[in-house]
Amino acid sequence: FFFAKVAAQIYAQDGEGTDKTHNVAIDTVSGYLYRVGGGSNAMRVYDIRGNKATAPVYLGSIGDAYVHDAEVITYISGTYTGQQIAFMCRAKSGSHGLEIYNVTKKNDPKLLSFITWDPVGYSHNVWVDEATSLAYVSDELDERHFSIPTTTHVYDVSRLKNPQYLGSFTNGNSAIGHNHFIRNGFLYAANYESGARVFDISSAISGVQNIVEVAYFDTYMNEKDQANFQGAWGIYVMPRSGLVVVSDIQGGLFILSADLPSSLPLSPSPSPPLPPSTPQFCPSHWIRLDVSRLPPSLPPSLPP
């Protein structure tokens, strides 16, 4: 009821008058919520500080085109210390790419830069590493339109007004790259038919060729991964427990626990054979993954 009430208040204040939303981005440091997707007037911003958390105040919109996803960060060091920077996936026909805005002044946001890649299908999801040095961007339609494997693009955003394209990386899979999230030097991706994927990005600043896939869990579990809109949709890593939560369109909710290596060689040597009872999710590393999945058909009280 609480969330429904807040959502209704957000809808009532939205100058666009739509109840459709693809996602929300919350800058927990500054206390602002940004609503993206579902409408044409870019990214909508709300003040949720203090008692406004239960009565959000609509402040206006940022940008001039549809924004599919975004991350907003309050910088804690460097030139933009204390300022709020928005990384926005602009998804407009003929103008797909990544917009970077300074949104510190909500009534006067400043576009710092716009960047794209080639070939571009659909600017979908962006996440910035913990050092705020590299931005990782997914394209949801390049696999279908251009018959290329799952691809993620990497930008050096250490200079926000002049970001540089560093290249892209792939695991060679044919599935569509969808939503990804970064935690503690690893990029976690929900890639539709190929399920949850984990990449070590700790050495990416030295070159995208250093990015290595270290684990995966196939939530969709079909025989051949294809560029279709089914399977793993969203992914999130709990900050304290490290549990990985994956939402699958057909399979429901998966809660995963992965024992990831703290550091990985760039050219890993083959692992010794695993015992038959231990699943080997990645051919190059020892990965233990415990899964808790509760289908709707199970009774509320499960046997131990």
Image: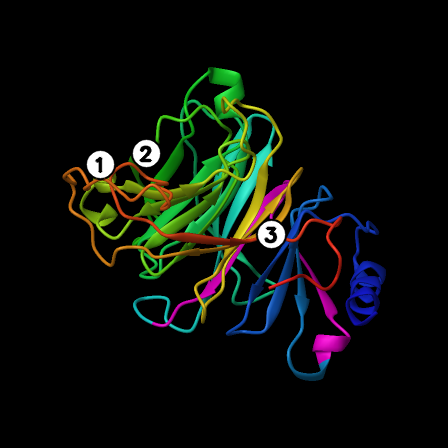
Magenta stretch: includes residue 59: yes
Q: Is residue 155 left or right of residue 92?
A: left
Q: Are marks 2 and 1 in contact (CB under 8 Å)?
A: yes
Which residue range is magenta in the image? 52-76
Give the image location of residue 289, x and y in percent: 42, 52
Give the image location of residue 290, x and y in percent: 46, 54
| Upstream in sequence: badge 3 or badge 1 | 1
Q: Identity of the amino acid at label 1?
A: Gln
Q: Is residue 207 left or right of residue 50?
A: left
Q: Which mark is nearer the camera, 3 or 1?
A: 3
Q: Quadrant of the C terminus?
A: bottom right
Name the secondary structure under disc 1: helix
Other-residue count near label 3 (Cα within 10 Å), few / some / many at <14 / 14–19 / ≥20: few
Q: Which mark is nearer the camera, 3 or 2?
A: 3
Q: Which mark is residue 169?
A: 2
| Upstream in sequence: badge 2 or badge 1 | 2
Q: Which mark is residue 293?
A: 3
Where residue 61 sits, quadrant-wise, is: bottom right
Determine if residue 160 is in view.
no
Give the image location of residue 233, x and y in percent: 59, 42
Name the secondary structure under disc 3: loop
Q: Which residue is mark 1?
A: 209
Q: Residue at x 32, y 34 (%)?
A: 169
